[in-house]
Amino acid sequence: MLFNILNKFKQETSLKKRIQGKLSATRPRGQVLNEFGGKRVSFPKMKGRTVDEIELNTSAEHHSIAVRFADQTELRLVLETGFTIRAEHMDMKSGNSRLLQRWPEISNER
């Protein structure tokens, strides 16, 4: 019986890898893709940038992950209650943040 369970798990894992490989090769970049009950989003405009610093901010009212690049811009991932992420690319050159690009919100499956 244990052999049957392990064999079934191996087959399911193999199928997921084959499907995931096909989806990754054919999906448009920068779009939300629903797969295996979840979501995956790419940020193609961030490719090739040199990361200077990554910072996690948490407080009672604000949670975010900031990825700062060498060109003094920033990709900020804002975490909301219930697992919602908003991704924003910010220009930080002048000392004040200026929004360059915003991606659609990413929410956990409910």
Image: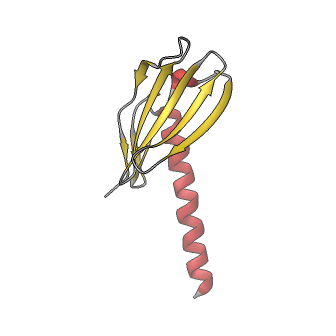
Above-or-below relation of 102 to 19: above
Q: Front-most of 99 and 110? A: 99
At horizontal 67% and vertical 27% (from top left) the residue drawn is 51
Q: Position of residue 9 (x, y in %)?
A: 56, 70
Q: Front-most of 76 and 62? A: 62
Q: Name the quadrant of the N terminus.
A: bottom right
Q: Position of residue 37 (x, y in %)?
A: 39, 55
Q: Is residue 79 left or right of residue 72?
A: left
Above-or-below relation of 2 to 81: below
Q: Position of residue 96 (x, y in %)?
A: 48, 17
Residue 21 seen anywhere in this rendered image of the structure: yes
Residue 62 lies in quadrant? top left
Residue 50 lies in quadrant? top right
Q: Is residue 39 left or right of residue 95?
A: left
At horizontal 64% and vertical 21% (from top left) the residue drawn is 49
At horizontal 67% and vertical 19% (from top left) the residue drawn is 70
Residue 41 seen anywhere in this rendered image of the structure: no
Q: Is residue 48 left or right of residue 77?
A: right
Above-or-below relation of 22 to 109: above
Q: Position of residue 35 (x, y in %)?
A: 42, 49
Q: Name the quadrant of the C terminus.
A: bottom left
At horizontal 39% and vertical 29% (from top left) the residue drawn is 103
Residue 106 lies in quadrant? top left
